[in-house]
Image (tube, coloured by chain):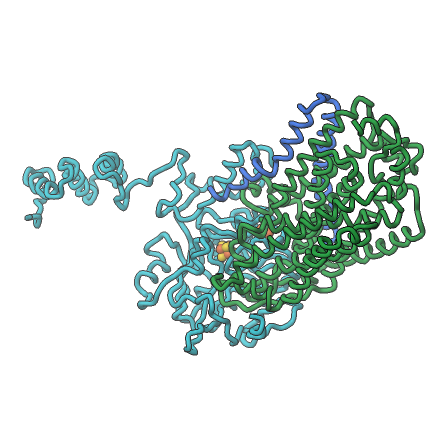
């Protein structure tokens, strides 16, 4: 049981800010799903960008690393 | 109000020889560091002085990880400051929020790549992401990766969305062309009705950043705190210790930046003295909290009732091998903190004094981060192993110091690219803010 | 009570009367007791299989005694078929990859990831073997340090066998002294402890460190490891050796492949190596190699005994049962909660034991302590620091 403590940590702790943003953007006053959508889109795009650039970094490093 | 705020655009609109010289110097430093990184990639971690603890009598994690912890802390502190300012809509501190967004992003990125540099197979960094679905269930390092990613995503979202609002209030034609282009891009499809919603979204994002700083912000501390094998790491205070160091260094880096900007660009109006009073108070408080937490962390290990392993680590710190570094580091936090507390008025006038003490405090936290990481590995306990040694090599120093200089370079460039805050010379928006 | 000579014919009235009298004396259910006894006789004569016997009486025994801990009782099963944790004999797999994946699946994450497919390969390999992947086999060692003479042949044999560089001492013999007014030098033969609750696995962010389900050996997937060294800092025993440089050791001749995972032999540059319990021998086609390790083979005083710790007949269990010579037995740093699978015979080093100078193999063998490129190590040179 102790070894899967990561799930509560992930869902209950690390993702708290994401829930806050989702709730706040979508249901906060004034309601405006277009702007909220832009905001969430920016976040999604940045997430993809961060993961993508990590992958790129791995590939570039792989070209330099001889082993 | 209409004229007072104009100075926030000064950094954007000027381009001095001094600045160019700075960029050139830092650029050269960056190239040297790049060379060191390539060298390390080609030869592997053998170019460091790291070695296995145990029979090889080395330390397994060295200044890369120590500096990672330092940068990650700085990011957390900057993040918390941004969150606080944006959530409470402290308009006077708007410029501090922008500085904080940039620093949180830059130090988060620095932390992220230092971790990658520290890998034996940096080309396999993607493995950490592809295995994430399984490893996040148990590996604190997977949590850490999650946290750093969340930090980068949310900070950059904050930066982009706040810039969208700020650009929308500016006359892009009056800005340098590349800034105008950036403004164009960020205000794509902007409608005036959006502003109110954007304000509200920035508040929510501010709240989210605050939450992230005080929850996920402890994860890099837990990375060490859960390791039962290492006395000096293991324990319930690790997350708090990391967070307190982070809050202090985050505020310190904001204070340095604000002081330097004001000094260089004469931004007395955009950065009034009360902002420095606020930062100075925060720094005094967080410095004090940091020292209290450190004391709490250390006391049990040096008290006569301490278990052997802990006491070896504690004693090496207090009066053994690391005593000089340790006391210098503590002094570097305590003395500036006391000076700030006693001579507040004189220190804060102009911001330069605050910047100087902030540099000293940041250095202290950096040294202590190194000691925290290195020491338990050096003074290994349990089996009859010898005390280890560690003298970072040139490559390690170049990459570490380089990472700090590159962070400064990135920030310097950013000051020429993005406005440092909200322009309030438009009567409409000024009134809006006052409401 | 006259229970001496039961009649031969278990179906006869005389036997019934005899058995009734015996069981009656115990105060338990007579009918059940007599039935158990009769059928036990049938099993002994081969008229009934053990399984039938167990099945026939399992519930009755539970009713009567509350527990059924007859040595051959069927193991209690959880609904999902896995043995309950903590039941003696389940041995390894305290945290199997399979249960990990189940949890991932349960929260809907596993289905999303590349990782799930990628990670499950070794589990699938294990499952397809016999349908019951959580095997009872837990490889381990009994190491008699009382016999050890610090000839260092195990260290040398290990590095030869696995093609390790001189500095990667997967097997290390530590020399130490206790601060007890005697000059006795003692030795600690220290391979990886192949822990059942291995902190190195919990640390690993790439899932490269894993327990092989068939026999509980802890291995590193060299293709997956990123060399972050979190496993090394979280292992209390200091048995992990990162390959900092191009290993440049001897050749590793056997196959590196262990059930489709590159995990045997020396670690490639930039990845983490440690004792594999000669995994390549355990999966070898050559049956004479299975169940052996290089260090065990070479030890001149028979201090190392390798085998299945759950099998009473295995070499380590036999050694522990018959050959300890009155020496104490212990597991190393047991308070760390790692559940190591090496049982030592001899004196346990205390926390204040100090390493003593002595040959570390440089002269005789190709073994060194210091990492390639770092300054030479002198034992005892740091005493002022302490
Ligand atoms: S001894 Fe260390 S490396 Fe070996 S299984 Fe235990 S924790 Fe892992
Ligand atoms: S060094 Fe390799 S095996 Fe060890 S924790 Fe890191 S990725 Fe896992």
Where residue B351 sits in the image (x, y, percent)? 81, 50
Q: State the image quarter where residue C373 is shown.
A: bottom right
- Which chain is tinted blue? A
- Residue B387 vs residue B264: left or right? left
- Which chain is tinted green? B
- Residue C103 vs residue B330: left or right? left
Whether C109 is drawn above or below C285: the answer is above
Q: Residue at x 60, y 62 (%)?
A: B375
- Which chain is tinted cyan? C
Where residue C137 sits in the image (x, y, percent)? 40, 50
Where residue B104 sits in the image (x, y, percent)? 73, 44
Whether B89 is drawn above or below B299: the answer is above
Residue placed most toward the observer, C250 or C144:
C144
Q: Residue at x 25, y 44 (%)?
A: C70
- Residue B108 vs residue B301: left or right? right
Q: Residue at x 70, y 38 (%)?
A: B84
- Answer yes or no: is residue B73 visible: no
Residue placed most toward the observer, B258 or C186:
B258
């Amino acid at each position: 049981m102790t070894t899967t403590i990561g799930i509560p940590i992930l869902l209950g702790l690390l993702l708290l800010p994401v829930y806050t943003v989702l709730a706040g953007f979508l249901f906060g006053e004034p309601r405006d799903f277009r702007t909220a959508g832009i905001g969430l889109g920016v976040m999604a795009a940045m997430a993809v960008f961060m993961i993508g650039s990590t992958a790129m970094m791995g590939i570039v490093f792989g070209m330099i690393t001889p082993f | 109000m209409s004229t007072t705020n104009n100075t926030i655009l000064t950094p954007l609109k000027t381009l001095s020889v001094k600045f160019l010289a700075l960029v050139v110097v830092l650029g050269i430093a960056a190239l040297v560091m790049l060379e060191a990184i390539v060298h390390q990639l080609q030869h592997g971690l053998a170019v460091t002085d790291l070695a296995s603890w145990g029979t090889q009598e080395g330390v397994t994690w060295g200044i890369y990880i120590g500096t990672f912890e330092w940068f990650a802390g700085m990011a957390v502190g900057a993040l918390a400051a941004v969150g606080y300012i944006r959530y409470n809509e402290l308009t006077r501190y708007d410029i501090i929020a922008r500085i904080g967004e940039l620093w949180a992003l830059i130090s988060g990125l620095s932390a992220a790549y230092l971790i990658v540099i520290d890998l034996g197979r940096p080309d396999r960094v993607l493995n950490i992401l592809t295995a994430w679905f399984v490893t996040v269930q148990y590996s604190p390092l997977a949590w850490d990766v999650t946290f750093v990613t969340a930090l980068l995503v949310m900070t950059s979202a904050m930066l982009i969305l706040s810039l969208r609002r700020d650009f929308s209030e500016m006359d892009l034609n009056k800005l340098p062309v590349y800034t105008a282009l950036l403004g164009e891009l960020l205000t794509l499809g902007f409608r005036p009705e959006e502003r109110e919603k954007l304000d509200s979204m920035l508040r929510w994002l501010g709240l989210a950043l605050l939450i992230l700083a005080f929850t996920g912000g402890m994860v890099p501390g837990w990375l060490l705190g859960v390791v039962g094998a290492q006395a000096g790491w293991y324990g319930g205070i690790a997350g708090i210790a990391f967070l307190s160091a982070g809050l202090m260094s985050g505020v310190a880096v904001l204070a340095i930046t604000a002081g330097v900007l004001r000094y260089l660009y004469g931004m007395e109006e955009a950065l009034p003295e009360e902002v420095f009073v606020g930062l100075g108070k925060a720094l005094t408080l967080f410095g004090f909290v940091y020292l209290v937490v450190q004391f709490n962390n250390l006391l049990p290990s040096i008290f006569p009732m301490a278990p052997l392993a802990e006491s070896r680590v504690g004693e090496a710190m207090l009066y053994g091998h690391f005593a000089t570094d340790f006391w210098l580091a503590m002094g570097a936090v305590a003395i500036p903190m006391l000076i700030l507390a006693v001579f507040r008025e004189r220190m804060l006038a102009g911001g330069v004094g605050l910047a100087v003490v902030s540099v000293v405090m940041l250095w202290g936290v950096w040294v202590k981060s190194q000691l925290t990481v290195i020491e338990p590995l050096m003074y290994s306990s349990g089996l009859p192993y010898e005390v280890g040694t560690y003298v970072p090599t040139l490559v390690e120093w170049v990459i570490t110091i380089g990472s700090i200089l590159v962070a400064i370079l990135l920030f310097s460039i950013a000051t020429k690219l993005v406005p440092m805050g909200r322009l309030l010379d438009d009567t409409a928006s000024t009134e809006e803010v006052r409401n | 009570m006259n229970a001496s000579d039961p009649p031969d014919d278990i179906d006869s009235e005389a036997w019934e009367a005899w058995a009734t009298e015996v069981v009656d004396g115990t105060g338990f259910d007579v009918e059940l007791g007599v039935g158990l006894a009769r059928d036990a006789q049938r099993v002994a004569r081969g008229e009934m299989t053990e399984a039938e016997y167990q099945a026939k009486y399992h519930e009755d025994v539970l009713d009567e005694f509350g527990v059924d801990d007859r040595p051959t009782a069927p193991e209690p099963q959880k609904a999902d078929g896995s043995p309950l944790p903590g039941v003696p004999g389940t041995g390894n797999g305290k945290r199997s990859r399979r249960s990990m994946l189940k949890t991932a699946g349960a929260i809907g994450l596993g289905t999303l990831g590349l990782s799930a497919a990628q990670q499950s390969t070794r589990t699938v390999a294990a499952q397809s073997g016999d349908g019951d992947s959580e095997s009872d086999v837990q490889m381990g060692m009994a190491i008699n340090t009382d016999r050890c003479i610090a000839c260092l042949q195990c260290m040398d044999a290990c590095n030869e066998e696995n093609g390790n560089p001189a500095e990667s001492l997967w097997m290390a013999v530590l020399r130490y002294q206790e601060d007890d007014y005697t000059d006795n030098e003692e030795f600690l033969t220290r391979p990886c402890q192949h822990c059942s609750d291995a902190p190195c696995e919990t640390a690993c962010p790439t899932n490269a460190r894993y327990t092989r389900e068939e026999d509980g050996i802890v291995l590193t997937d060299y293709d997956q490891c990123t060399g972050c060294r979190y496993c090394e800092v979280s292992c209390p025993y200091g048995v992990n050796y990162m390959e900092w440089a191009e290993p440049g050791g001897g050749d590793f001749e056997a196959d590196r492949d262990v059930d489709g995972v590159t995990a045997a032999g020396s670690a490639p540059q930039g990845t983490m190596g440690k004792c594999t319990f000669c995994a390549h021998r355990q999966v070898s086609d050559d049956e004479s190699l299975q169940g052996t390790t290089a260090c065990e083979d070479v030890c001149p005083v028979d201090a190392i005994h390798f085998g299945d710790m759950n099998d009473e007949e295995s070499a380590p269990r036999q050694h522990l049962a018959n050959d300890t010579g009155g020496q104490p037995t212990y597991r190393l740093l047991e308070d760390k909660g790692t559940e190591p699978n090496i049982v030592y015979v001899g004196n346990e080093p205390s926390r204040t034991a100090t390493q003593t100078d002595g040959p570390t193999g440089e002269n005789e063998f190709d073994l060194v302590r210091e990492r390639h490129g770092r300054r030479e190590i002198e034992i005892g040179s740091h005493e002022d620091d302490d």
